[in-house]
Amino acid sequence: MLVTMKELLEVAQKNHFAVPAFNAGTGQLLSGMMESAEEKRAPVIMAVHPDELKFLRDSFVSSVIYEANHTKVPVAIHLDHGGTYEQCLHAIQLGFTSVMIDGSLLPFEENIALTKKVVAAAHPLGVTVEGELGTIGQTGDSIEGGVTKVTYTNPADAKRFVEETGVDALAIAIGTAHGIYPKGFVPKLKLDLLTDIRHAVSTPLVLHGGSSNKDEEIAESVKRGICKINISSDIKFSFMKGVEQYLNDKGFEREPNVIYPSCIRMARDTMEEKMALFHDVDQVKCFSL
């Protein structure tokens, strides 16, 4: 069932779970996501970054829409880290039910103005908008980008940002980074800051850079109000380790349909671990289908 992200996150917020947003790096990850979502009865978001969309081509969106319309699991298709107004409009025209406009590197007032402009275009068409306030870190191996030094989200700024833009979801910076963390690096989330932001705004909150954080911190962030968690690096790493393992064990193989099933299974294992961690398993029961 194709839905907007707003529909997903309102239910998640009310029932205290988080919906995973899995990034599409290849069509096989879409297959894996749908198989796991149906088996676990877990609502999901297919997130597509502009660079991924360029690689997969616009026609990929039709595949996501088809899959969503042929399942009873609620599925949203979301533009991840749209960098410009034009990218968001293009996604809306393709049939995305949600777009993110990332103005986090802009001055505060410019971020508000850009986000408000996207909201004005999207809302009349029933499309959800996610904004971002504060900057997410980066490890240097992720298409989503980020900065070397995290700028943490200020609760008072979050309140004003939500009120002035009318966004449906807010991505916040509390200490995560995009990509797989380097060996020996131990990230730590500012969970007290999350609580302060949750008290300042009622809008569903989003955690970016959810790969490789401690499970207990992620679980606690869900308890404290995170409703959507982006997972990209972890599932891609699992999938590509599957490719590596197959070729090392079996040698060269020309047929993708021979190589990929085990790789999809490995990606699915990671997806299902995240679904369980986010309390997303069996939450289809919370939706009126």
Image (cartoon, rainbow, N blue to C red):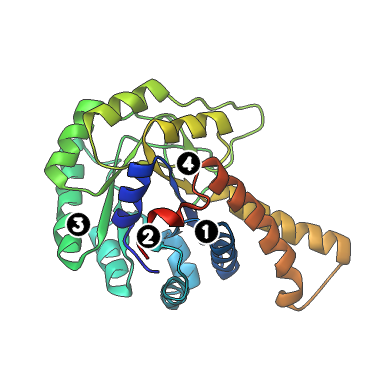
* Closest to the observer, 8 or 164: 8
Residue wearing tag 1: 41
**Residue visible at 18% across and 55% down in the picture:** 119
In which quadrant of the rendered image does the C terminus lie? bottom left
Q: Position of residue 125 (x, y in %)?
A: 19, 67
Residue type highlighted by circle 3: Val
Distance, label 2 to label 4, CA atoms, is: 16 Å
Residue contact between numbered discs 1 and 3, judged by CB atoms under 8 Å: no
Q: Earlier in the sequence, mark 2 or mark 3?
A: 2
Q: Is residue 214 visible?
A: no
17 relative to 84 in the view: left or right = right
Q: For the residue marked with disc 2, what is the amino acid?
A: His
Q: Which residue is mark 2?
A: 78
Front label number (1 vs 3): 1
Asked which secondary structure carries label 4, the reply is loop
Residue at (35% x, 61% y) in the render = 288
Q: Describe residue 24's horizontal placement relative to residue 94 as left or right.
A: right
Chain-order first, disc 1 or disc 4: 1
Residue 32 shows up from this direction:
yes
User: What label does residue 209 carry, if any?
Assistant: 4
Q: Is residue 276 above or below residue 121?
A: above
The CA distance from mark 3 to mark 4 is 23 Å
Where in the figure is residue 223, as x and y percent of width and height? 42, 32
Q: Specify few, some or many for label 2: CA neighbours under 10 Å numbering under 14, 14-19, or 20 or more.
A: many
Q: Residues within 10 Å of mark 3 (few under 14, many from 20)?
A: many
Gap in Å between the C-alphas at discs 1 and 4? 24 Å
